[in-house]
Image (tube, rainbow, N blue to C red):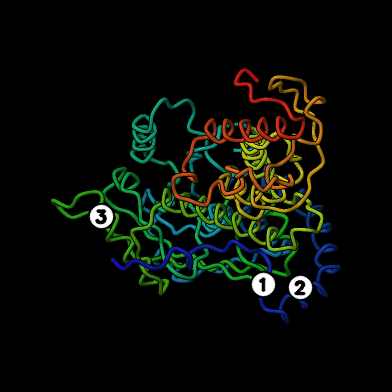
Amino acid sequence: METRGIEQMFDFQRLPNDGLLLLLVLLYSPVGLCLMLIRMCVGAHVFLVSCALPDSLARRFIVRIMSSVLGMHVRQKSQRVRDKSTQLYICNHVTQFDHNIVNLLTSCHTPMLEDSAGFVCWARGFMELGATSSPDDMEESLRRYCSTPGTPPLLLFPEEDTTNGRAGLLKFSSWPFSLTDSVQPVALQVKRPFLTLNTPDSFWLTELMWTFFVPFTVYQVRWLPSVSRQDGESFQQFANKVQEILATELSLVSTQITKADKAEHIKRKRHRDLQTTTSNLGARPRSGPFMVRSSGVEESRISRMAQQVKEVLPDVPLKVITRDLAQTNCVDTTITNLLESSEEFPVEATGRATGGTTSELGPAWRSPSSVALAPNIKPAAKCFGKSPVDRHMSLQERKDALYEYARRRYMEKHGLEQDNNL
């Protein structure tokens, strides 16, 4: 199997990057919003009709026509190849409504495998499995369903998650192929103008609204000949064989990328985007105002880092610390920058006592970098952090060094003798 770059298999941006296409989307937006409102009303009628009529050829025909009004156009090829004796259809996964589309062409059931059962599960057209305590119980329940005569076929998606349908197929899970020895592959292609078909972790209701917004979405279903498991062939080998058949039919590649790999890729991409956003915010001039535009998680992280810096530099305002952290994203670097800065910081009451109250220390209790030093006093904290040893000092060591420096400056300013108890 080939391995296609994971970046090419998913779309993280709904709108097009091309300037001309984006302009067309903006010009189309008023029409799209009107279409969405009208289709929401029509969609309610489609739902009522599908609930009122029994499962039959007439019901599927009526709902298919009404779905075209909603902008969901369904086409099928090789209808005669469809095997009526097959109890399991295997399809690639592109949108969150793939099972509804195939169900417009033939009677089939798709079980809800992850979300909890209930009205929403039933309204979306999923089959409820009931209480299953483990994956083994679920597989056994589906295996009994497939072996029961007269039941509609199952429609399963071994990829277990959606792709953009343009680059490759996720690795097929082996458990669906343990239910029966014969399956029928179903190749699904979906096309839509202007906008992407889906984005990772997008809620199904959001996807439905975008489907109503665009002029149309074309679903093309192709039935492929049934495939049987050979003697001595493992379930995973059977799954790989069907995956290759579908990939060849769709002009895609089979990959070893799994659903878990997709989740990890999404997590890493969001982290990179968050770092990029923070870096862009920090690229502005340091003298300019700072406005927090990051997410709540990023704000919490910056706040924790700012408190760590505040423990070392209690006299520096949090506003200044936060501004510098947005640029450096590092506690040690921010401490070094503030120590080496020549900026005068206003005094903040910290409630700490070092041989006297904060008010007694007065202006002497400032950032070591902002105090005018006497020629005979060597500021240990002024060069603090410039050597590798100093940069790896613990927070407590940094605090002790700063307290000692402030004490020496206070004693010098008021002409007092050195007292180790202060």
Q: Do the residues under discs 1 and 3 have CB atoms within 8 angstroms?
A: no
Residue 231, percent from left and from top: 14, 52
Q: Earlier in the sequence, mark 1 or mark 2?
A: 1
Question: What is the secondary structure assignment of the residue under circle 1?
Answer: loop
- What's the residue at 57%, 66% (across, down)? 219
Q: What residue type is labelled 3?
A: Phe
Q: Earlier in the sequence, mark 1 or mark 3?
A: 1
How far apart marks 1 and 2 lie (CA) works out to: 9 Å
Which residue, given by chain and number where applicable, does mark 1 sit on? 16
Mark 3 Cα-neighbour bin, 10 Å: few <14, some 14–19, many ≥20: many
Which residue, given by chain and number where applicable, does mark 3 sit on? 238
Q: Do the residues under discs 1 and 2 have CB atoms within 8 angstroms?
A: yes
Question: What is the secondary structure assignment of the residue under circle 3?
Answer: helix
Q: Which of 275 and 338 is in front in this view?
A: 338
Residue 171, percent from left and from top: 36, 56
- What's the residue at 75%, 23% (across, down)? 351
How far apart marks 1 and 3 lie (CA) works out to: 38 Å
Q: Earlier in the sequence, mark 2 or mark 3?
A: 2
Residue 398, percent from left and from top: 56, 36
Which residue, given by chain and number where applicable, does mark 2 sit on? 25
Q: Which amino acid does label 1 sit on?
A: Pro
Mark 2 Cα-neighbour bin, 10 Å: few <14, some 14–19, many ≥20: some
Q: Nearer the viewer, residue 208 or 280?
A: 280
How far apart marks 2 and 3 lie (CA) works out to: 44 Å
